[in-house]
Amino acid sequence: MASFMAHVSYVGPSHFYHRTSTKFFTLSCHFTNQSHKYALFTSITDNTRYRNWKKRKISSISCSAANKPSTPTDISSTAKIRSEVLTPFRSVRMFFYLAFIASGGLGGLIATTRLIAALTNPARAPEVPEMLQGLGIDIGAVSLFAFLYYRENTAKNAQIARLSREETLANLKLRVNDTRTIPVNSLRGIARLVICAGPESYILESFRLSEPFTESLLDRGVLVVPFATDGNLPSFDFDESEEMKDLTTKKKRLWQLNPSIISDWSKWIDEQKKLAGVSPESPVYLSLRLDGRVRGSGVGYPPWNALVAQLPPVKGMWSGLFDGFDGRV
């Protein structure tokens, strides 16, 4: 990360941030770029202004530049929006849970004060059992709705965390060919990605196992992203004979995508393994739905036959009708 700070003199009123006692303003700037570092140079050419600098109001401009991608806060905001769309009534339920908790808590407080007053007055002793019953109901209601709120909030946080990881995955880059690189999210609604992460031998065996299902996988919009965790790029053996030309073209299309910016992919996959309690050396696969959400994952080779059996085609008379039937997330 590259960062810098520039201080320049300024004559005139403050427009961005003003504090009456000190007469200064601060402007904070942030620049983001992955491949370049920016610098800001300021020169003062007015000698008269420079000589009178100490007599003038002083303004400070602080700028920083960073060569890192968007912050996790932006990703979390997107995940929260998607969470609201996926579960639109969750916020309503949580609101009513809080309202019931507040109502039960207020009722319990009133019942407690009445019970204390009754216990200090022997004349009201017959009222104590009824008060205890009412207090027990209030405590039970508060406990029940607090548990329901806690469960709903836990599910919400887990969903947002999962959607945040999916948004991070959506921003990872894929290399289509030598001249074109695209983010994963550009394939939403177009392809169902299957990510195979493991050593070179695992990638090659996954390729061999997928060969009988090549046409069926392509009909269902499946595209494979092989990620070699050992750094050895796999070399697929394609039959270039004339009679196998059509099938070879389809195999190349099925396996045409490759991860770009390997460090980002490696970091994301390692985080998923850690969260799932999987050994870092274990080969894994992840399959995505058309909407970019993770459909399934596991250790070992992708179940190509199950994908063919469960996924609907993306073309033909059923196109569009079953686009959301990618399986549970």
Image (cartoon, rainbow, N blue to C red):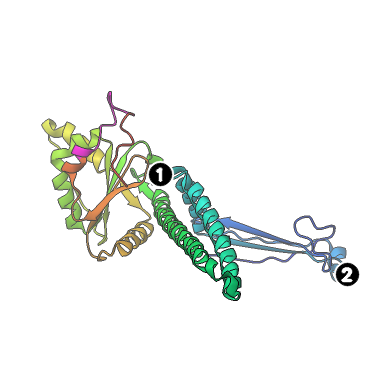
Q: Is residue 182 visible?
A: no
For the point 30% across and 37% down, which residue is it? 325
Label 2 SS: helix
Which label was assigned to residue 185?
1
| Residue placed under numbered mark 2 in the picture | 55
Q: Which residue is more in the foreground, 59 or 135?
A: 135
Please report the bounds of the magenta region as a residue range: 308-320
* Pair 1/2: label in front: 1
Residue 119, quarter of picture:
bottom right
Q: Nearer the viewer, residue 248 or 77?
A: 77
**Pointer 1 local density, CA inside 10 Å: few below 14, some 14–19, many at least 20:** some
Distance (Cα) linking label 1 and label 2 = 55 Å
Neighbourhood count class around disc 2 (C-alpha, 10 Å): few under 14, some 14–19, many 20 upward: few
First in residue order: circle 1 vs circle 2? 2
Farthest-out residue, front: 123
The foreground one among 202 and 298 is 298
Q: Identity of the amino acid at label 1?
A: Asn
What is the x, y in percent for residue 87? 44, 45
Image location of residue 218, percent across then percent down: 24, 35
| Residue at 81 percent of width and 66 percent of height | 58
Magenta portion: prevailing SS class: loop
Q: Name the kind of residue labelled 2 in the image.
A: Lys
Which x, y percent locates residue 162? 39, 54
Q: Is residue 6 above or below residue 292?
A: below
Quarter of the figure with residue 14: bottom right
**Does 236 lie within the magenta span?**
no
- 316 part of magenta stretch: yes
